[in-house]
Image (cartoon, rainbow, N blue to C red):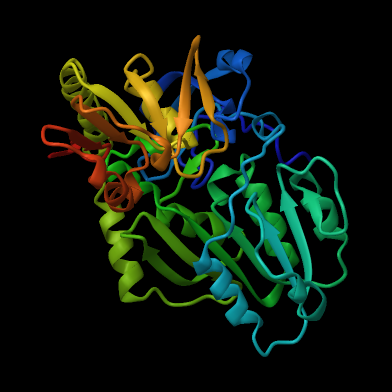
Amino acid sequence: MNLSTLIKDENSCQICKKKNLNFFFKIPRLPYKTVNNFSFKKKDYKSKKALNTRYCDYCKVVALKEPLNLNLLYKNFKNQAQHSNFIKLVVKKRLHGSKKINLVNIGKSIELLDKKYHKKKVNYLKFDPTVNKEDKVNKKLNSLSKILKNKKNKIDLIVIENFISNISNINEIVKIISRSLNEKGKILIYNQYGILSIKNADISRFYHEHIFYFSIKSLLILFKKNNLYLNKIKLIQNGNFFYAVFGKKQNYINRNLRKIIENENHLNKYFFFNFRKILKKNYIKLHNILSQKKIIYVYGCSVGAMTLITFYNLKNFIFKIIDDNPVTNKIFLQKKTIYVSKIKDIEFSNNKKIILNLIPRHCNKVLLKVKKFMKKGDLFINFINDLEIKKF
C-alpha cells in the first residue's frame, strides 16, 4: 500500500462519507515547490497547480479537491521544523517515571527527544515523508504499514505534530495506528484549527502541503470509525491550534468539547461564503493602498507567505522580503528576483514605506521587531480579517 498516493476526487466526504461537499475557494496557479520556504531554483517557478478546496456541510472539514502526491511534494525537502516546546514537554512528562516504551513519531518535524531518551526510555521510530534513505530510526512514510504490521510489541505513544492535515490517505493511516496502538496507548496530536483560519480569513494557512483543514467534529468522526476516542482537547495559541489526545477507552463528552461541537454545528454556508467575500473585499482595499507611491516590504518568507503573494498578486510591488530566519537569500517569482534580508541588515530609506506582515499569527512579535524602523506616515498591514492596518 502506498500511503503517499493521491486521494480520488469523489463526491462524498472522505471523513464522514456523506455527500455534503460544496465548493469553498480556489487559488489558480499556486507554486507548489514553495514547501521548501522558497528555497527552489529559478526554473521551478513554473511548478504550479491550482489550490481548489471544498467543504463538508455536515462535519465542517475543508479538503483539497486534487492534492499533490506526497512523494512529489516532499522531494528534496530541506526546511524541517523543530517540534514545539509544548509537545516536547508533554512527551517528557509521559516518559517520566515510566518503563521503556515504544514511541512512534509521524511527520516532518525534527528533534522530538534528546538522544539520551532513545536508549534509556524509548524504542523510537520516526516516519517521515521527506526521508530518502532509511536507517534504524528514520523511516519513509510509505513504510509505516509494513513496519507497524510486523512489529511484535504494540505502540505506547504516537506523536503527530503539524502533520495530520498533510496526509492524503488519512483513513488508512488512522486505521493502521489504531491496530498497532497498545490498549492503554495514546495518540498526541498538535495541529492548526481549520475553523479559526476560516473565521479570521487567514489564507496564509492554505497551501498544497495542507490537504485537510479539520474541525474538531470531523476529527472525532475520523478517529471513532477506527475505535479511537478523544481523551483530551485544548485550543491553544488563541485558538489557532488544537492539542488532542486519543486512546481506545471511550470517554464522556465534557462541557468544553460540547461547546466546541455546538459552535461548529451552527456553521452554515454563509460562514464559508463570508470567507470569500472578505478576501475579495480585502483584495480591492489592499491594491488601493499599494497604488500609493511607497516602498513595499514584506515580512515573512514561509510557504504561507507564497499563498498571500500569489492570491493578492503582490510580486510586482515587493521591494524586499524581511525574514530573520531565512532559508535562502533570494527567491524567484516568475522572472523577478527578490532578495531576502534579516531586519538588522536592512537600511530603510526616509521614503514612506509599507510593511506587509505575511505571518499573521505572529503579528505581535513582528510588530515589535519593525516598530523602531517605522516613521510617521508608514503603514503596517496584517493579513487577517478585513486587514488590520496600523498607521504610524
In the picture as drawn, the residue positioned furthest to the bottom comes out as: 97
**Residue 391 image offset from top left, x and y in percent:** 12, 38
Residue 79 sits in quarter: top right
Res 261 visible: yes
Residue at 74% across, 53% down: 127
Residue 375 sits in quarter: top left
Q: In this view, does 278 lie to the left or right of 173?
A: left
In the picture as drawn, the residue positioned furthest to the top comes out as: 335
Q: In this view, does 154 lie to the left or right of 228?
A: right
Quarter occupied by the C terminus? top left
Res 53 visible: no
Q: Eyeballing the image, is 147 above or below 315?
A: below
Q: Eyeballing the image, is 359 above or below 317?
A: below
Q: Eyeballing the image, is 231 above or below 180?
A: below
**Residue 175 image offset from top left, x and y in percent:** 67, 55
Residue 307 sits in quarter: top left
Residue at 35% across, 50% down: 362
**Residue 327 image offset from top left, x and y in percent:** 57, 37
Q: Is residue 325 left or right of residue 288?
A: right
